[in-house]
Amino acid sequence: MDALIEADRLSKKFGKVQALSELTLTLPAGQPVAILGPNGAGKTTFIRMVATLIAPDRGTLVVNGHDVVRDPMAVRRMIGLAGQSAAVEEMMTGRENLVMVARLYGQGRARSVASAERILDQMDLVEAADRRAKTYSGGMRRRLDLGASLVGSPRLLLLDEPTTGLDPVSRNEVWDAVHAMSVHGTDIVLTTQYLDEADHLATSIVIIDGGRVIAQGTPSELKSRVGADMVELHTIDVPTMQRAAEVLASLGVAEPSTDPATRRCSVAAPSGSKLLPVVVRALDDAAVPVEDIALRRPTLDEVFLALTGHRASTPDSDPTTPAKDAA
Amino acid sequence: MTITLDPPRQSRPTEAVTNQGASFLVASGQVASRTLKKFVRSPALLIAGTAQGLLFLLIFRYVFGGAVSHTGGLSYVDFLVPGFVVTGVLFQGMSAASGVADDKEGGLFDRLRSLPIRLLSIVSGRVGADTVLVAWGVVVMTAAGFAVGFRVSGTTAGALAGLGLTILFGFAFVWLFIALGLMAGSPQAAQGLSFLVFPLSFVSSAYVPVSTMPGWMQAFANNQPMTQMVNTVRLLTGGPQAQALLGHPVSYYLVPSLLWTAGLVIVFAPLAVWKLKTT
């Protein structure tokens, strides 16, 4: 069997917080995998365990044939980790940062310089190579951090929320970089809170919540389980929202749902974007004014609602996520 | 619940990559050089620490100094400068604590610990760099001491020994501050260590003679490590006047100083390594 990661009943507690609860998972090599879940689901704990940074309380975790507890050094020899915060030294240049990590991987001086050069090229940082990382944009810093995790040509790349905190432009830059790596043949396991990110970067998605696996599959498999896209509209007041809901119901596609608090009304769109002009025309014929109308994909919250029957816990609603360790 | 994903569809290149990892010395050197580069390239760090030290020196030398008596035949500047330089390692050490807390929070230690290098090389690199910074601070503050009138009355060899002992003492305190910095968790929390630094530096023989303090305070001041090392260095630099003031030979203070130095390393080195491991 060609399993890259085999987790068997992994459990980990931080104080009173059960970060992982008998998590069992087998990931084969050769596919970019996204671990998707809300804050506090156990994503970071799992990634940190694979990276040998924390040991499980119970259960076993084998990475490419090596047990993370019994032989952490063997695991470290073949992984690259880019954690949640870009761990680059701001007062060093991009090149210096990469050479340092290459040296730590055990490469000689000349080879480290060559590796750094290759990564700078791959991460599109050649022009900024000799500037201090302090002057980099958020996206460049993230790319440099990703590059540092790649400088040892790892067999397995671990990315913990690679785009959290980035603006949309930087996010796209990082997405492109990650995509390039997976094409290059590096195995990638990444965590994310965003369904669209998992969809974009991974061919397999594992959804975890409350420290255990709740679903897995390809993006399209999961989406078909969750339901189709939605047409969603906003209205100026509640009576208008109700009239809009009547119009949507009259189309006979699906039962519309309404949210008076946000004066929002939505209906499932199994035929995708084809429904949008139909809805617009029907509303226009009925003279129902709308503020905004859009076709929207299911959110992570809706995925959770569909798969678990409860909404994804958010940092605000979940008091049990005090530390990033538990995230 | 057991989940198995589909088998891989594409065949992946199986280039054999083995990262043997850097040797202990190379790894320590890389970690140390990173900390030193950061320091040298941050003018704010460089200037703020030095300026604060100089300010302290000037205040004690010229503002309080005139009012301090009970220094026997030793002039106040010759009394003060050994104390000022030795306790300076505490302030330097505090920046080591916030430095490691910063590294921890910024994810640097996660990166380093995920690499195929020994944990001890990470700590020793950091300690090595911070000891260099302590040594630098000691040399700068000693030079400042000379600038405000400090002179060595003992032998040059004794004075140099005092300098070396101070740096060794600083090395021991670096272990303490690195362990505490890792325990503090955040740079802000590490600032809280000033509650440790101020009593150790001020409730000692560094700035004023202990004999003028209330009895209960003397009990602490006389027996804490700073006083032992301050008096050792004072005897090594102050010649017969220092001898007359303190009334003991160098060994009386040197032995406890060295015991403290060894004790700090024995207690805090394993603690620092353990904290890093369980971060």
Image: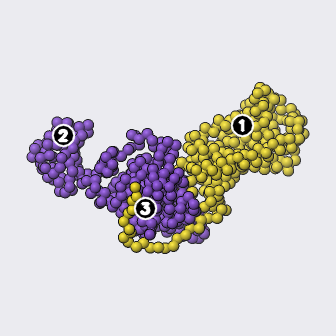
Decide: few, some or many residues near mark 2? Use Cα within 10 Å; few <14, some 14-19, many ≥20.
Answer: many
Q: Tell me which residue sits at (22%, 41%) in the image.
A: A258
Mark identifier at residue A26: 3
Q: Which chain is purple?
A: A
Q: Which subunit holds the residue at mark 1?
A: B
Q: Dot 3: what SS?
A: strand
Q: Dot 1: what SS?
A: helix
Q: Position of residue A128 (x, y in %)?
A: 48, 61
Q: Nearer the viewer, mark 3 or mark 1?
A: 3
Amino acid found under the numbered disc labelled 1: Ser
Q: Is residue A175 left or right of residue A278?
A: right
* Front position in the image: A166 or B75: A166
Q: Which subunit holds the residue at mark 3?
A: A
* Front position in the image: A249 or B253: A249
Work out whether B250 lies above or below B11.
Answer: above
Colour displayed for chain B in the image of the structure: yellow
Mark identifier at residue A241: 2
The answer for how far apart the CA atoms under marks 2 and 3 are is 47 Å
Q: Is residue B11 left or right of residue B146?
A: left
* Front position in the image: A156 or B158: A156
Q: Position of residue A112 (x, y in %)?
A: 56, 67
The answer for how far apart the CA atoms under marks 1 and 2 are is 70 Å
Amino acid found under the numbered disc labelled 2: Met
In the image as oriented, which residue stretches furthest toward the left?
A285
Q: Position of residue A86 (x, y in %)?
A: 49, 54
- The residue indicated by pointer 1 is B201
Q: Tell me which residue sits at (49%, 42%) in the image.
A: A16
Q: Which subunit holds the residue at mark 2?
A: A
Q: Dot 2: what SS?
A: helix
Decide: few, some or many residues near mark 1? Use Cα within 10 Å; few <14, some 14-19, many ≥20.
Answer: many
Using the rendered image of the protein, determine whether residue A1 is visible from the camera's viewpoint.
yes
